[in-house]
Amino acid sequence: MKKKTSLSNNGCQQSFQNKEKIHYVHPVLYNHHHPINIKLIGVGGTGCMVLRELGRINVALQKLERPGIHVIACDPDVVSESNVGRQLFLENDIGKNKAVSAISKINRVWGTSWIAEPIKHEHVFPEQNPSIIISCVDSVEARRQIVESYQTGNPVTKNAEGTGTAYYLIDAGNGDNFGQVQVMTLREVKQPKKTDYHTLDEIKSVLDIYPKKSLQQDGPSCSLAQALGRQDLMVNSMMANTICVMLWQMLRHNYLMYRGAYINLADLTMRPILLG
């Protein structure tokens, strides 16, 4: 990590205010002997593509002699005709639950035993509380419900290593050709005593950034052509890749110097969101 050097007139080290901000992830993400539990909420346009990348992350971690990840995906919706082509579903998936269909494919390809829950995200099972939540839902209200569910989760379910407690939410929301990915802490994460950086115990809630009606999706489309009229074909894959870039940074390098990114396909730009 590149460090800024800024000395005062008397030669003292750089002031606290001038230090680069950083968040070191909770040790449960790298100091353990079990796979990292991740819950993916929403297996639609963005979520199904996140699931595909999670398969790759799992393999990569195992090649690095890490335990990998274990994923629980939940979504109550079924695959419709308009989902084929825009989302990672086939004709023979129509009428099947999205989470079940997507997870079964991943398990067959990678030999995993990940879990599908064909239910709404409001149903929180404390014994399955993950360390990381990935939210790919369509409304601000759904995001609020997710945050409230896991911020007030029962702490007695965690074991000695701290697993069983949700520490992070990675959230994605998009419009027709733009979107944003944000990471937030669901509870305070004590930072190591470092002098080179301004460490942050908490990362600001995504709910403080989304306006009440922002990134709210319309109802389901009847056809792929109609769906493409509302949303660019490539926006979901861009969102999914950005989510997994943030996740990989957390799992591979154990720190964050940004809390997300703004994406705009119209002018092909991506802007980082600084820690605040």
Image (cartoon, rainbow, N blue to C red):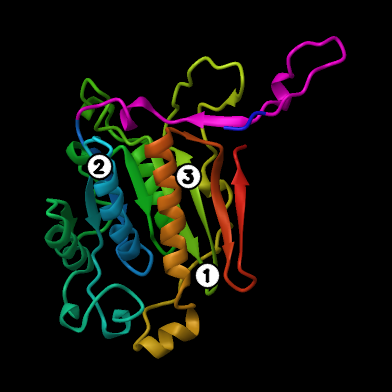
Q: From this view, report whether residue 125 is shown above or below residue 240.
A: above
**38 left or right of 237 in image:** left
Q: Residues within 10 Å of mark 1 (few under 14, many from 20)?
A: some
Provide the residue designation for mark 1: 175
Q: Quadrant of residue 63?
A: top left
Q: Quadrant of the C terminus?
A: top right
Residue 243: where, in percent of width, then height? 43, 53
The reply to whether the magenta stretch includes residue 11 is yes
Question: Which of the two labelled residues, at mark 1 and mark 2, occupies the earlier sequence position?
Answer: 2
Q: Looking at numbered disc 1 in the image, what kind of residue is underneath it?
A: Gly
Query: What's the magenta region?
Result: 4-33
Compare marks 3 and 1 and give the one earlier in the sequence: 1
Of residues 117 and 84, which is closer to you in this image?
84
Neighbours of disc 3 within 10 Å: few (<14), some (14-19), many (20+): many
The residue at which mark 2 appears reads as 63
Q: What amino acid is found at the position of numbered circle 3 in the picture?
A: Val
Name the element at disc 2: helix
Q: Secondary structure at mark 1?
A: loop
Count the marks: how many?
3
Residue reaching furthest to the right: 9
Q: Height in image: 64 above or below 24?
A: below
Q: Determine the CA span between mark 2 and mark 3.
A: 26 Å
